[in-house]
Image (cartoon, rainbow, N blue to C red):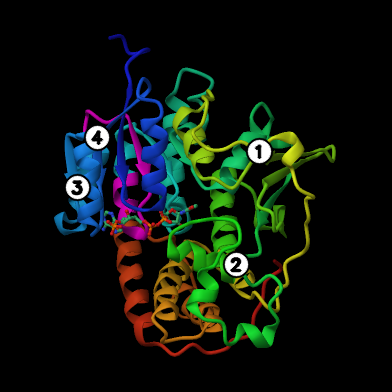
Amino acid sequence: MSDATRRARVAVLGSTGSIGRQALDVIESHPDRFEVVCLAAGRDVATLDEQIARLKPRLTSTAADGPAALVDMATDEGVDMVVVGTSGVVSLRPVIAALETGKVVATANKETLVAGGHLVMPLARRLADRATTPAEHMPLNWLRPIDSEHSAIWQCLAGERRSDVARLILTASGGPFRETTADQLANVTPADALAHPTWRMGSKITIDSATLMNKALEVIEARWLYDVADDQIDVVVHPQSIVHSLVEFTDGSLKAQLGLPDMRIPIQYALTYPTRLPSPAPRLGGAQIPDLHFEPVDDARFPALSIGREAGRQGPRASAALIAADDVAVDRFLNGSISFNGIAELCGDAVARFGANEVEAPDLDELIALDADVRAWAETAEPVQTSRGGNA
Ligand SMILES: NC(=O)c1ccc[n+]([C@@H]2O[C@H](COP(=O)([O-])OP(=O)(O)OC[C@H]3O[C@@H](n4cnc5c(N)ncnc54)[C@H](OP(=O)(O)O)[C@@H]3O)[C@@H](O)[C@H]2O)c1
């Protein structure tokens, strides 16, 4: 079989999670295009065993095998593309290793860019500089976003010159508390926060959507992916989650990408770029498009957005502290040890403590150590209300 017709050999990291399972669904709907050769899970051995029986990958691992197993998969010479659906900072080392060995990386994982954007983007740019075809000449060919908002922006930018981009507009569903008052927010429960109105996702990102921390992390990711300044990114609440994001150009034109909220569409775009294939996701027929509604974010009720944006402006150390603290804070909210508002408070405190006086961007080992330090602190720290800056 020639290279042009050979199936892409894919490693799926985090195959048992929400993104991982949907990535497998996309891959299995195109058996002529893709072949799963590696599967990595965390602790859900039962789901992994079922996937192994179905897909017969050559290599598999669980968290018990340690991070080196993920690096082995990401750099295996029998792998063409690495799909990253893991949560946490564990996938940062394998992503870097995959890019260093010239693999395509399609990532949903937030830490890859929020904590490690300064490490991964230069590698994607280096691969793009060496490429020979126009599609491969783009850094985004090598580090492909899966998140629906970043996929939407990527799709809107197709065929456009970067110098013509005026502004990116990220849409946020507003989560389950869009209409909840500040007083009520102080007492919401994990069950309330997990009831996302439009998206079905893992519990961490669902809580991040309720606080709007998810949108702050996406602003930071967008800055790395699209090389734009913080003040060129706006966030707008769009409760229907049909418009996945927009780009405004210098002439005032807006381009948007629309579709039903189903992650299999952006996952598939990341896998098949620059081509498109029929998708297993349901379609949004033109006549079904509901009235589309947009409104500004209420910063007073959702301070996480400005806290997160401020961390992004401070730099990689502050962003890494933010995402590590948020991971622990969300866990603590889910197990009842802090309140919903305590999540943003703990994150603001972590950024102030661990992100201040950033002189040099941390290297990978420093980032991993910082992640551990922030987590250890956040496990027991009491949330305190701090003054909130930012211009979200
Ligand atoms: N879900 C979405 O719609 C969505 C959308 C955009 C972006 N994202 C981002 O994508 C990432 C994954 O989200 P998710 O919702 O899919 O999370 P999830 O459902 O919690 O899945 C996380 C996956 O990571 C695996 N994992 C955890 N620790 C691991 C380790 N040490 N080694 C290998 N695998 C490990 C888990 O394995 P086990 O389950 O086996 O423990 C699971 O497969 C997050 O960064 C999230 O913010 C998600």
Q: CA distance from mark 1 to mark 2?
A: 26 Å
In the foreground, 190 or 366: 190
Where disc 3 sits, the SS reads: helix
Q: Quadrant of residue 67?
A: bottom left
Q: CA distance from mark 4 to mark 3?
A: 10 Å
Residue bearing the label numbered 3:
49
Residue bearing the label numbered 1:
284
| Callouts 4 and 2 close, C-beta under 8 Å | no
Q: Earlier in the sequence, mark 2 or mark 3?
A: 3
Q: Residue furthest left?
A: 65
User: Against 389, is 254 above or below?
Assistant: above
> Which residue is drawn at the image coordinates 32% and 16% (left, top)?
6
Magenta region: 75-95
Q: Earlier in the sequence, mark 4 or mark 1?
A: 4
Q: CA distance from mark 4 to mark 2?
A: 37 Å
Q: Residue furthest right?
A: 251
User: Against 185, is 277 above or below?
Assistant: above
Q: Quadrant of residue 5?
A: top left
Report the number of discs: 4
Quadrant position of the N terminus in the picture = top left
Q: Position of residue 42 (x, y in %)?
A: 25, 57
Residue 252 colored in magenta in the image: no
Residue bearing the label numbered 2:
212
Where disc 1 sits, the SS reads: loop
Q: Nearer the viewer, mark 4 or mark 2?
A: 4
In the foreground, 35 or 247: 35
Where disc 4 sits, the SS reads: helix
User: The disc labelled 3 sits on which kind of residue?
Assistant: Asp
User: The disc labelled 1 sits on which kind of residue?
Assistant: Leu
Q: Is mark 1 within 8 Å of ligand 1?
A: no
User: The disc labelled 2 sits on which kind of residue?
Assistant: Leu
Q: Position of residue 375 (x, y in %)?
A: 35, 75
